[in-house]
Image (cartoon, grey):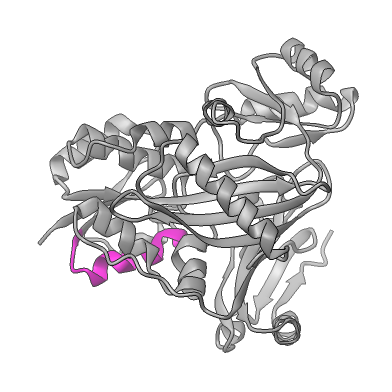
Amino acid sequence: MKKLMIIGSNWEKIPLIKSAKNLNLNILLTDENNDAEGFKYADKIETVNPRNLNKLYTIAKKFRPNGIVADQCDYSHFAAVYLSNKLGLYKDGLSAAQLTTNKLWMREACRNEQVLQPRFFSVKNLKEAKVAINLINFPIVIKPVDNRGSFGVNIVHKLSQLEKCFFDSLANSHSRQLIVESYIEGKHITVDGACDQDGNHYNLAIASKKNMKGSKPIITDVVYPAQIHEDLKKQIFKINSNVVYSLGIKKGLTHSEYIVDIKNRCFLVEMANRGGGGLTSSLIIKNLKNIDLSKLIIKNALGENFDFKYTNKKISVILKFFNFKPGKINKISGVNEINKLKNIVFIKLLIKEGDVLKKPKSGAERHGFIIIKYKTRKELKVIEDKTKKLLRISYDKKK
């Protein structure tokens, strides 16, 4: 029986873990949490942070896997590529993993290939940030070069806001290095893709997004396919293919973010060499294109063939994030009933009874999400109305 090591075992990784189980593999699961939801499917488990590469290497040497995989997490993906290269399981992907997990290196590599991006500067302190702002002008975005989930990402409109935002970004930067870049006003777009086993990249899906208002650009809705003109979709796909080339990605999945301004200019925000979070790569793309990307990355890791075929289903999918009002939760009801509805792909609350809710400050602090498939906007409205009636959050009235 072949052995597979999976880095990361939270609820997002369960479809990946189940795909591995269906392939009859001996599975070692790792996660930084002792009670990770995926652990119940494992043959062997280890508790370790995905950024602790030395400990992961010791674990991998002892387990002697035939392949190592991860998805929907930058840290886990980099660890899987690092270990695979160090153990000699395959000898590629490390450069792309480096470029896609460091936003400064990514920007520099894409600039060399004339990819349109916001004007940007690397900064280490407030003085350098102010110099960059003088060259760019407000509003600007300040963010870590090496974090995820919008941790430490701030939109700054005036100088009096800079110091607070600078230190928030710095606290969330592992390398203590930041980027200051021009803020682009426009429509937010996501592109998801994958490479076949010959290294050819395919743009599989495109979505338009909505953000929360304010200084924290946190996503609230993601709609597939994107609600934009077909000619613009083709333009974005062409740009996305150029970004993949610029970053040297020839293996695995891609998840890219862009902003299209009022002149229909498409600016690269960032690209990751892994699947999109919130079950995008494992469930949403599967519903849209009838291709199992979890199986693809497992087969790639094991050096086995995967029949790279997909079909365009005539449906739409929306990923909606919950943002409930602040307060202490007394009771939650209706989730099981919503799960039984025909068009619900998945629902997940990231809160529980007794929690004190606050306004999210990063993508990781959102209160949960729901994935709905539909054929018409009218059908979607009916489903949304049903879920609103069924999902009930009651709050503690004590002050």
Left-right relation of 307 to 268 = left
Q: Position of residue 314 (x, y in %)?
A: 57, 81
Q: Position of residue 288 (x, y in %)?
A: 52, 73
Q: Which residues are magenta?
A: 11-26
From this viewpoint, which residue is outermost toward the top?
127
Q: Residue at x 55, y 26 (%)?
A: 112
Q: Position of residue 227 (x, y in %)?
A: 72, 66
Q: Residue at x 63, y 68 (%)?
A: 225
Q: Is residue 77 above or below residue 313?
A: above
Left-right relation of 365 to 97 = right
Which quadrant of the figure contains the N terminus? Answer: bottom left
Residue 355 visible at all: no
Which quadrant of the figure contains the C terminus? Answer: bottom right
Q: Is residue 296 above or below residue 71?
A: below
Question: Could you say which is closer to the camera, residue 300 or residue 279?
Answer: 300
Left-right relation of 50 to 396 = left
Q: Residue at x 40, y 44 (%)?
A: 76
From this viewpoint, which residue is outermost toward the left?
1
Q: Majority secondary structure of the magenta segment?
A: helix
Residue 120 visible at all: yes
Q: Is residue 221 above or below residue 108?
A: below
Q: Quadrant of residue 343?
A: bottom right
Question: Could you say which is closer to the camera, residue 296 or residue 170?
Answer: 296
**Is residue 17 magenta-colored?**
yes
Q: Is residue 375 above or below residue 367?
A: below
Q: Position of residue 128 (x, y in %)?
A: 72, 12
**Is residue 97 magenta-colored?**
no
The number of discs equals 0
Q: Quadrant of residue 229?
A: bottom right
From this viewpoint, which residue is outermost toward the front?
231
